[in-house]
Amino acid sequence: MADTHYQVIILGSGPAGYTSAIYAARAHLKVLLLEGLNSGGQLMITTDVENYPGFPKGVTGPDLMADLRAQAERFGPEMIPMDAVKVDLTSGRPFKVWTDEAEYTADTVIISTGATAQYLGMESEQKLKGFGVSACATCDGFFFTGKEVAVIGGGDTALEEAIYLTRHCSKVHLIHRRDELRGSKIMRERAFKNEKIEIHWNKVVDEVLGDTNAGVTGLSLKDTVSGELSELPVEGMFVAIGHKPNTELFEGVLDLDETGYILANPGSTYTNIPGVFAAGDVRDSVYRQAVTAAGSGCMAAIDAERWLEAQGEEE
C-alpha cells in the first residue's frame, strides 16, 4: 500500500480522538489523526476545567487539549489539522477518506467528530462564551455558586440543566419563548416544585449584557407577545436548546438515531459497518463529558486493534 494507507484513521480530535490516537499508536498501529480545522473540540472554548481527573488545581480547556495532543504525538501517529470532507465506508475495505488536499485509505476508521452545542447566534453571546455564557451546566455550574443565572430553553435538556444548577446557584431563571414547557411531565413537575427556579414565559434573549472583563452582567429580554424589552440581572447564561452531532458525512451510511447521533452496539464502539467505530460526543447524547469521551476513545482504539487482530492484519 502507498504511504497514504493506514491501519487506523481517526476523524476528529478532542478527548475522544486524542485518546484513540494514544491507544492505537501505542499499540504500534499505523495511525492517521485528522484533527479538523478547529482541533481540540468543545473544550477549546472552555476556560476552566475542574472535573477532569488528574488536575487537582483545575486546567483550562485549551491547556488540557494541548497536553492530550502532546501525549498522543509522543507515540508517533501522523496528525493533520484538516477536516474529512468525504468518506467511502460502503465499497469494502480499504475505507477511503478525503480531505480538501488528499485521499487516504484505512483498514479501520474511528469517528470522533463530536457534537456542537446549539447557540442563539448573537454576536454578544459569541463574545462572552467562556465568560459567563456556557452550554454545559455539569461542566461549569460550580463556577456560579451562590449566583443568579439564566437557562435558555424549554425542553428536557433545559429543565435538567436548570434543576442541576439549583445545587450551586442562589436562583435560576428559566427563559422560554412560549407559554408552555416542552419537557416531559416529570421534568416539568420537578421544575415547578423547585423554589429556586423562576420561569419567564414568552421571553427570548435580545442581547447578552456584559464584557470579557466583568463577564455576563445581565440579559435583555424581549416579550414574544408584546415585543416589550426588559432587563434581567444575572451573572451567567446557560444555553440549553440542544446539541447537534457532527454526523453529516455519515447520513445514509451509518445507523443514526432520530437526532443524528451514531448508534453503536451496546457495551462497545462498533457501528453497523464492521471496522468502523464511534467514540465521544458523536455517539453520546447523555453524558457529554470530557472524561466519558476520553473513555470511549480508549474503547474505540482497543476495539479497532482487536478487530484488526481478528482479521489477521495487526502488525
Image (tube, rainbow, N blue to C red):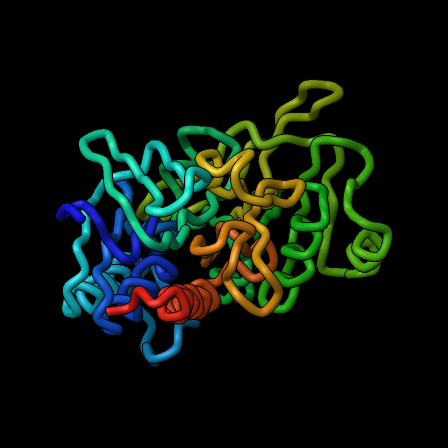
Name the image quarter holding the C terminus. Answer: bottom left
Whether residue 294 is visible, yes or no, is no
Q: Nearer the viewer, residue 61 or 95?
A: 95
Q: Residue at x 41, y 69 (%)?
A: 310
Left or right: 23, with 16 as reference point: left
Q: Position of residue 90 (x, y in %)?
A: 46, 39
Percent coordinates x, y for residue 199 in the rendering: 74, 45
Q: Is residue 14 above or below residue 223?
A: below
The quarter of the displayed image where residue 43 is located:
bottom left
Instruction: From the viewer's side, name the closer residue of 152 and 312.
Output: 312
Where does the image place residue 173, in percent across and percent down from the top left? 66, 48
Residue at point 18%, 49% (across, down): 1
Displayed quadrant of residue 137 = bottom right
Q: How many numbered tags mark residues here?
A: 0
Residue drawn at point x = 36 percent, y = 41 percent: 211
Q: Is residue 125 above or below residue 196?
A: above
Which residue lies at the image location 72% right of the left edge and 55% below the top edge?
A: 197
Q: Is residue 252 visible?
A: yes
Measured from the top left, where is residue 226 in percent x and y? 73, 19
Left or right: 231 as drawn, with respect to 196: left
Left or right for 57, reference 155: left
Q: What is the quadrant of residue 14 in the picture?
A: bottom left
| 172 displayed left or right of 210 | right
* The one of 310 and 116 positioned closer to us in this rendering: 310
